[in-house]
Each structure stands twice: as C-alpha cells, then as structure tokens.
Amino acid sequence: MANGPVSILIRVRPAAVKVFDPVVLTRAALERVLRAVGSDVVVGLLRVDRNSVPRWRAGGRIAQPESDRILDLDSLLTRALQVFHADGAGEWLSSPSPFLHGSRPVDALFECGLGPVLTALAAVLEGVFA
C-alpha cells in the first residue's frame, strides 16, 4: 500500500443532504445529551433558559450558537464515554485538568472549543495526565 495521498474523486450523493441535515443532527445530539446528563445539566452547560429545552424538543428552532454547543457537547460525551465508564466520564468532565491549565473539561469546551478538550482526553488515554 502506498504511503502518499490517494487520488479518489469523491461524489457526494444527493441523499446526503437529508442524512446530514443540521437540524436533524442537532436534534439527535440533543436527545443523546439529555439522556446522558439530564435537562438541568444541559440548561446549565448551555446557559439557556429552562424553557429552551422543552421548546427545542417540541420542534422549536435551535439558534446556531446553541446548536454548535449541543453538537460539541455530544461529541465530547461520546469520546469521554469511549475512554471512561459513565461515572469516570462525569468525574473527568467535572474535575480540573492539568492539561487544560486547571479548567474543567466541560468549561474548557465552551471557552476554548472542542479541539483542546479532545487533546486533553487523548492525553489521559495515553497516560500523560489522569
């Protein structure tokens, strides 16, 4: 197998528009996050009004900033649950991390973005930081 780039023409099928519809993806992510941590935690993390979550679940519009945060939180929870059991994931997300300069991963997610937090999680997985 060659080590260089592979020359493949990628044609995205028209059905991909429905499969990757941002509204559908965000709503699915919201449901996963709600099942994982509950409505009160989601409201607190996203810093939204308590009525937002029921409104979103009933089909209300989710603004782009909240949609982005929901998708990032879903990605982080997915990855954390691949590394830790549920209690360990919750503890790691809620505890200060030396890799994140003492910030809690869940806070750093919304302050610095998903990238640095996933890097911190990878460091834990590699045994660099607990």
Image (cartoon, helix red, strand yellow):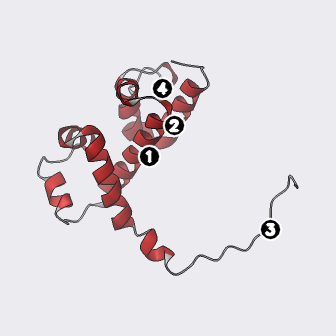
Instruction: Name the side, left or right, on which 81 lies relative to 121.
Output: left
Q: Position of residue 88 (x, y in %)?
A: 40, 24
Instruction: Determine whether 35 is above or below 15 in the image.
Output: above
Circle 2: residue type: Leu
> Which residue is rendered at x = 54% and y = 24% of the image?
124
Is the residue marked by circle 1 packed among few (<14), some (14-19), or many (20+) residues within 10 Å? some
CA–CA distance between discs 4 and 1?
A: 18 Å
Residue identified by numbered label 3: 7
Task: Answer with mark 3 or mark 4, whichever residue precedes in sequence.
Answer: 3
Disc 3 versus disc 4: nearer the observer = 3
Residue 75 marker: 1
Residue 100 marker: 4
Task: Answer with mark 1 or mark 2, whichever residue precedes in sequence.
Answer: 1
Residue 8 marker: none
Residue 118 marker: 2
> Which residue is rendered at x = 35% and y = 28% of the image?
90
Q: Secondary structure at mark 4?
A: helix
Instruction: Determine whether 108 is above or below 10 in the image.
Output: above
Query: Split into 4 quadrants, where in the image is the N terminus?
Result: bottom right
Quadrant position of residue 87: top left
Q: Position of residue 121 (x, y in %)?
A: 51, 31
CA–CA distance between discs 1 and 3?
A: 30 Å
Q: Position of residue 94 (x, y in %)?
A: 34, 26
Q: Secondary structure at mark 2?
A: helix
